[in-house]
Image (cartoon, helix red, strand yellow):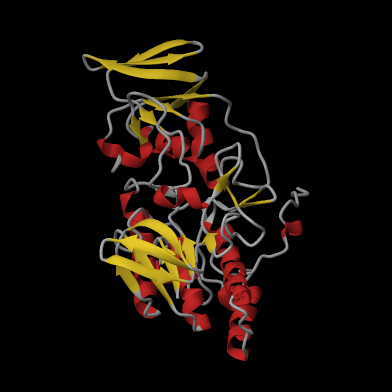
Amino acid sequence: MITVIGAGPSGVGMSILLKKLGLPFVLVDRDEVGASLAKWPEETTFLTPSFTAHGFGALDLNAVAPNTSPAYSLHKERFTGLEYQRYLKSLVAFYEIPFEKRGIYKIKKQGDAFKLSHSDGTSLSDFVIVATGEYGAPIQPFEAGKHVSTVTAYDEESTSVIIGGGESAADAAIHLAKHRDVLVLMKEQWGTQHHDPSTTLSPYTRQRLFPLLSDGSVKTRFVTVQAITEQDGIYSIKTDGGTVKTDHVPIVATGYKPNLGPFREWFEWDASGMPVLNDRDGSTIDERLFLIGPSVRQRNVIFCFLYKYRQRFAVVAETMLTLSDQQVDKDQADVFNDYIDNDMFLDDLSCCDAGCDC
């Protein structure tokens, strides 16, 4: 038995592959399928566009499985979290994925198996795949301030100050600038370009944000925020360049970290605060426990975008078959070949550091 913990994009995508391979598994989550996506701000959409192009050998960038396309299902190029949740729920129904709504709060070993403790008691699993994402673990280093993950709609926010310089800060600035001028407190200037959008602003964000910087709707100040405090409704933002005061709660867009919760002890951690994995995305503590999703790192390659981390599902599945001493039969080989043909089986990372010539 295989247990997949987390019913977001990575958990659902992994489950579809396991179903196609005919392996026994269960997908579990303490909430409904795609629950974190439903919490996105109403205005926030996917950074990567969707097109129905797999008939021409190009899988939709936001698909979690071959022969599926959120562009086709949702009739849109870019969609909100709620819309993408509908896509995931439709896949769970279509592929008849065994899903159980339960929270796993502890993992122990019982012989060669994992003993999982949950709200319904305990269960045993030969392999565990952790797909808990990052949205549920926002980084909030300050005493006061509203983390961007708690924003439900930007048109309901009265703030004009944002702390942070990543995608979530830029997205907040873009939407808030429709209602008022915005000040962004950040360490470094926006604008550095890199071929890997995991390390810089995406092209979609740049094309929306830079005109607002040019016309002054969004202003930036390059400082390090040291503290945020609140007294009598006034927020004081202490920086290494002085103090900024505002009478509206500032938005803190300082990013997210791996949301491993009770499974944290099953991973070693590097100096940057990321889980250490073997070359098959297994834990270095127990190779039968895997991590999939945006927190996966391999040889400095960042797999934080959906079109990146979906390429590792088949690597994990193949590894589980190997560790189980199971031979890949013809039907399973056909499934793996389908994933290879759709660029969803990345086990050679030598191609991942190529730059752009122009």
Residue at point 46%, 41% (across, down): 256
Residue furthest to the bottom in view is 330
Q: Quadrant of the N terminus?
A: bottom left
Residue 136 higher or lower than 121, as above or below? above
* Residue 156 drawn at (x, y percent): 25, 37
Residue at point 49%, 84% (across, down): 22
- Left or right side of 312 for 177: left
Q: Quadrant of residue 56?
A: bottom right
Residue at point 61%, 36% (across, down): 271
Residue at point 66%, 39% (across, down): 193
Q: Quadrant of residue 312?
A: bottom right
* Residue 267 drawn at (x, y percent): 53, 50
* Residue 4 drawn at (x, y percent): 43, 66
* Residue 291 drawn at (x, y percent): 53, 58
Q: Which residue is nearer to you in this view: 251 or 276?
A: 276
Residue furthest to the top in view is 242
Residue 244 higher or lower than 315, as above or below? above
Q: Which residue is nearer to you in this view: 258 or 284?
A: 284
Residue 277 higher or lower than 194, as above or below? below
Q: Which residue is nearer to you in this view: 41 or 175?
A: 41
